[in-house]
Image: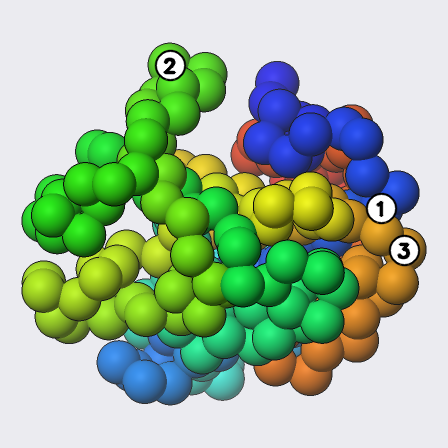
Amino acid sequence: AYAVGSLVPGVFEQYARVLHPAWAGPDAPVQWNAVAAWSGRTLHALAQWDFVSRPLGEIRAPRPFVQPPRSGGLPPHELERLCSVLAACTSTADRCFLGIWEGYGGLPLSEWASGSELRLDQRTFLVTEGPISTATRVDWRDPGALLPEPPTLMWPADRAWFVASDVDLDSTYVGGSEDLIAAVLAEPGLEAWPANSTDRVSIDSDSINAM
């Protein structure tokens, strides 16, 4: 099964898993802990949405979400909060590499003409270089935005950290120093859990809620 180490290089002191929110409306994110409180499930570091969102027994309260978490990268607000933490933990915040999966439709390829291609695990990513603020120029509703989809991969020139958001997963994984991961876990705008490079990221990793 795929593990965190297949997404983020296994060279960092610590790792974190950032959960993508569910949605009660277009601009109304819902954290997993609210869903777990409703469903009666246990939220933990290896929890999987398919189980957490499945009620345990009869539930009378209305469902707190209408749409599940989006796979791929973090939504704009959460991405901004993460980038704020990341920028403080690198000496090269003005020189970062952003990779976006080439399979996304509607990419403004002219913006990426000076970039290069990176092939990993049978997938190809278009990579560009720029300040970390480039990562936050995401607008799902604007096909002409620099990034109509959030970055799939991010890392700074000094390699202080690495961020991976697989196109099929509803979580983003971060590798970095102990201080960086502590800051990610403490950031109130993010719902994050500690992770290990050996943690599985497949549906069968949630043995607690699968029962």
Residue at mark 3: 178
Left of 193 or right of it: where is 93? left
> Label 3 crowding class (10 Å Cα cut-off): few <14, some 14-19, many 20+?
few
Residue 162 placement (x, y as % from top left): 64, 44
Residue at (36% x, 39% y) in the render: 127
Residue at mark 1: 14
Q: CA distance from mark 2 to mark 3?
A: 31 Å
Of the residues shown, which amino acid type is indicated by label 2? Gln
Q: Is residue 143 above or below residue 116?
A: below
In the rendered image, the quadrant that contains the N terminus is top right
Marks 2 and 1: in contact by CB < 8 Å? no
Secondary structure at numbered mark 3: helix
Q: Nearer the viewer, residue 72 or 47?
A: 72
Residue 21 placement (x, y as % from top left): 48, 68
Q: CA distance from mark 1 to mark 3?
A: 6 Å
In the rendered image, the quadrant that contains the C terminus is top right
> Label 1 crowding class (10 Å Cα cut-off): few <14, some 14-19, many 20+?
many
> Label 2 crowding class (10 Å Cα cut-off): few <14, some 14-19, many 20+?
few
Q: Which mark is residue 122?
A: 2
Of labels 1 and 3, earlier in sequence is: 1
Q: Is residue 206 above or below residue 52?
A: above
Q: Is residue 7 shown to the viewer in this render?
A: yes
Q: Nearer the viewer, residue 144 or 158?
A: 158
Q: Nearer the viewer, residue 164 or 116?
A: 116
Of labels 2 and 3, earlier in sequence is: 2
Marks 3 and 1: in contact by CB < 8 Å? yes
Of the residues shown, which amino acid type is indicated by label 3? Glu
Of labels 1 and 2, earlier in sequence is: 1
